[in-house]
Image (tube, helix red, strand yellow):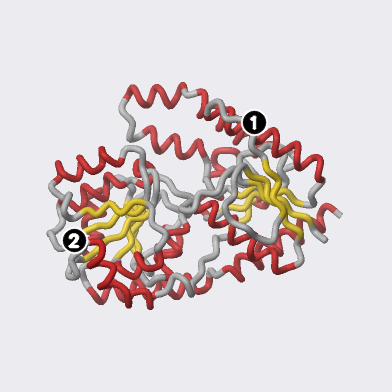
Amino acid sequence: MTRIALIRQQYRPDGGAERFVSRALQALSQHGVELALITRQWLDEGPFKVYPCDPPIRNRISRERDFARQASAICAHENFDIVQSHERIPGCSLYRAGDGVHRRWLDLRRQILFPAARWWQEHSAYHRYVIAAERAMFSDSRLRTVICNSAMVRQEIIDYYGVASERLEVIYSGVDSDLFHPRRQAGRAALREQLGIPQAALLHLFVGSGFERKNLETLMLALARLPTEHQAAVVGRDSHLASYQRRAHRLGIAHRLHFLGVRHDLPALYGMADTFVLPTLYDPFPNVILEAMASGLPIITSDTCGGAELIADQAGLVAPARDDEMLRLHMMSLYDDERRRRLGQHGRQLAEKLDYDSMTAQLLSLYGRLLQEAA
């Protein structure tokens, strides 16, 4: 029996990468694969053996470095057929680049930082460590294939690290198109009443933790210059939440911007909304894009989001990440009921093709090729 180990440090219920690992484990368990999970902490139970890997954390660098060392030792001892890492660990045979390219994120983030913060980023020991680990992993001869969750990430790995294109495989994350479904709109009125959101409002939904990277600021600027019938709901966490709430008051939109925190009823929230807006500064391909598409929502996202390559005027609209004026125009254009319906319908049709069965088939095909090459 083929033995596959998946490596991921921690499970956070609202984390896109963690949800991908959960779904991959569930799907692969149906195909006679013996699964192992190497992790610090995992909340789900499933058909896999957990190998605890939880060295002490002294700082951010030790968190990454010591986990990588201990996970590598476990893999060497167990001699798995395939080791699929979701962390930057040199020596893994298969890496899923769900977090994208760290160097690319830093280049984009540098553009929004003040000089002092830019200096700190450039001299940060942590960022230097991550870049070194990233470089070492991509140049390691034991790395046979990289799973990219978007064509955007695939090209970035080529551009930044010169990895041969034939070693880079694009496999989109699957989505549960039955759980995330337009029929969830049936609960729209009740949920809006519960959350204090006017029934007549055109509601733009934003889902994502870490508001700087997800670029909530640009959404707020656009919302401030839209008619009052436009409102937005923000789902997710951020350590600087109070700062964003104060910013909303200064912009005069506090009554139209609803901070909902971390929620576990995302299907219902998509059903409550009219559009999905994520002007992220950098996102390889957030699962929430697929979930919103499956829910029948038109999408507005940025050109530095891997999800943009799927929607391209058929399922939604794309704008430069920090262009709040173009974002405002896109949000305004979706006031049109027919346009929202048409884009949402196209998105639903696309999402139905990106189900778990499709993702699993691609993963199994990849594993088969890797095992055949190693035989």
Q: Position of residue 359 (x, y in %)?
A: 60, 65
> Would you identify the image quadrant in which residue 30 lies?
bottom right
> Would you identify the image quadrant in which residue 277 lies?
bottom left
Circle 2 is placed at which residue position?
Answer: 230
Q: Circle 2 sits in a helix, a strand or a loop, which is it? A: strand
Q: Position of residue 181 (x, y in %)?
A: 42, 74
Residue, x 38% and y 78% (percent of image)?
183
Residue, x 46% and y 21% (percent of image)?
123
Which numbered circle lies on residue 231? none
Identified by mark 2, the residue type is His
Placement of 299 over or under 72, stated as above or below:
below
Foreground residue among 165 and 361 = 361
Residue, x 34% and y 51% (percent of image)?
261
Placement of 56 over or under 27, stated as above or below:
above
Residue 233 is at least partly visible in this image: yes
Foreground residue among 92 and 167 = 92
